[in-house]
Amino acid sequence: MLLIAAAALGYFLRVELAFTGGVLGSPLDDTWIHFQFARNLSQGNGFSFNPGDPQPGSTAPLWTLLLAGVGLFTQEFMVPALLLSAGFFLLTIGLTYGFTFRLAQNKFAAFLAGLGVALSGRLLWAGLAGMETTAFAAFSLAAVWLYTKQGLRPVPALLFALASQIRPEGHLLFGLAALDVLVQWLMVNHQWSMVNFKRLIAQFGPPLLIYALVAAPYALFSLDVTGKPLPNTFYAKADTAQFFSWRTLRETMALHWQDNPVSLILVLFGLLPAWRKSRLAVLWLVGLWLLTPVIVDQVWHHGRYTMPLIPFQMVVAGVGLAWLLQRLGNSGWRQKLPNYPITQLLILLIFTLAALWQLPKWADMLATNTKEVQDIDVALGLWLAENTPPDALIAVDDIGAIGFLSGRRIVDMNGLVSPEMWPAVRQPVGLPRDRALTRLLSQSQPDYMAAFPLWHWELTSNTAVSRPIHKVETATHTIIFQPEAFVYQTDWPYLADAQPQEHVDAVFGEAIELVGYDAGGDEANLELTLYWRSLAPVDADYDVFIHVVDGDGNILAQVDRQPLNSLAATSVWQPGDIVRDRYTIPLPPDLPQDTAVRVGLYLRETGVRLPVNGSDFVEMVGTTN
């Protein structure tokens, strides 16, 4: 099995290198996030993405620590990370075989279970991703196997704790184990009885203490930094709009069906026999399938959050196969079969073909995913390193490769390492989120933004805030959010203070003050920047009108729109906000000398203007001269 798996890994790697032009990489930008944390940790900069800024931004702190150990010897993390993920993949195969044999007592069924893991296209993909997925599969499988054998003893508790530091779902696995222990203690001879709590504490106190000693430090670190016990990524990606996502469940089960349809059919026969041998294995398999739709509203990265269940799927399938073979033997069908070894060979052939048909797809997926990350994220990181000042602050969508390769400080617009962005991330994609992002990013005033335009259309298409200066693109679209991304130079509208060229200090409707303005331009255009201050909340989105008028008040040129084209609409202003609002007003030829500019606020639906100083506009004389 291990030779088969090694050959499959070699095949996947060959396909990847052929597609990427011989460049070794990862199919996920998240791999580079681990590299950045590991580099900072190994260089004495703490558990941080931006050096010196502690953040629980790694979902897999133990994986990050392993890579930090690598960082003590080399800052080239890619090859060691791939070797680690591939090594844990091979270890998972051996554990699958061993655990299945313990439950089924059938070498043929155990071999098929191990083979199912070895030929799992998604786990082969994960084995060459440099991520923690295969490590979590190995640790969780080892923990459940040892728990099934020993119960909740110190060593299984240690394995559960280590698993929880590779993926936060490991806490659920330990919780299910604790629940299983509690049920066993409460039920004696299938009847409820009194519990001897002293004996309970004496027996299970040490394992619980071991788990707490391993799991508590990162949880306490998270609590200290963000006030929440789990890593940032959980809160940034968790779905709060609905309790249960049927879409996630459908997509998850479809992926596990594609992993090996025969195995999923055998799971149906193996659930009850496996439950009798290891309740926790079944609880974990079914429980995480059902919990994932509660946490996320869609499947991420080919369902990588449930990839560690593939070995458990194969274990239960192996138990189901052993049960079926035993039933056939007990019913006399085994003697009626023309040749039992040939029957086994036929089962092996069908099972193998059910896995092999997906391998070319997943090999190609690894290749295209890796090429997309290189074309977009790696390319952006390298460009920013060469074309921006060392002290530049960058607002970013995909933070991993950009943060690692650019060497610049990062503001994460998706909140993985910037929890201050969580209020924006919780808004619907589109104008609500871009409005919130604009406000929050104005606090730190990033110099540049590296973003996918479709993700932040209102923000990236607003030239008053962002101007594209560099574009990268890729030929395929299999894992990257969008096959093109841009670097933007930015100018954020919310300010800490206003220093206009000219002061006006006019108050509209006792709620909005026009502090002043800057004026410039040429014969063709008037460039006007208004500075607003919010004095009180307003419920409506007011439009700004700017009229260039002659001496008789006739309108010669005008612009009407909401501040920042609604990106900083008046309804989202908060008392004390200062908003810089830029306009370009095209001017007619032969403009008279006796012109003025009038500025006001009105509701588009009704045309009603806000009063100001006994009028409904402010006049700035001679601005166009």
Image (cartoon, rainbow, N blue to C red):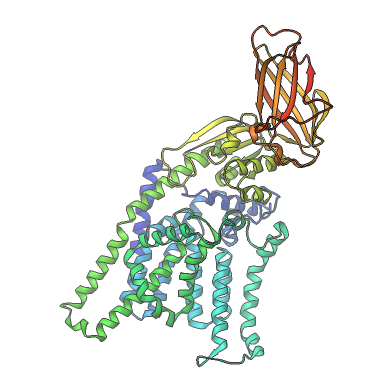
Q: How many numbered tags mark residues here?
A: 0
Left or right of residue 143, residue 346 in this image: left
Left or right of residue 401, residue 573 in this image: right
Residue pictured at 68% horizontal, 29% vertical: 607
**Front residue (pair 485, 65):** 485
Q: Is residue 329 above or below residue 399?
A: below
Which picture quadrant has residue 592? Answer: top right
Which picture quadrant has residue 444? Answer: top right
Residue pictured at 56% horizontal, 56% vertical: 70
Left or right of residue 304, residue 196 in this image: right
Where residue 161 appears, x then y in whole percent?
59, 70
Quadrant (top left/top right/bottom left/bottom right) for the N terminus: bottom left
Where residue 586 appears, x then y in whole percent?
64, 17
Residue pictured at 44% horizontal, 62% vertical: 89
Q: Is residue 1 visible?
A: no
Where residue 445 appears, x then y in whole percent?
70, 38
Outermost residue, left side: 338
Which picture quadrant has residue 167? Answer: bottom right
Where residue 172 appears, x then y in whole percent?
56, 69
**Front residue (pair 113, 595):** 595
Q: Is residue 173 visible?
A: yes
Quadrant (top left/top right/bottom left/bottom right) for the C terminus: top right
**Front residue (pair 530, 299):** 530
Residue pictured at 25% horizontal, 84% vertical: 329
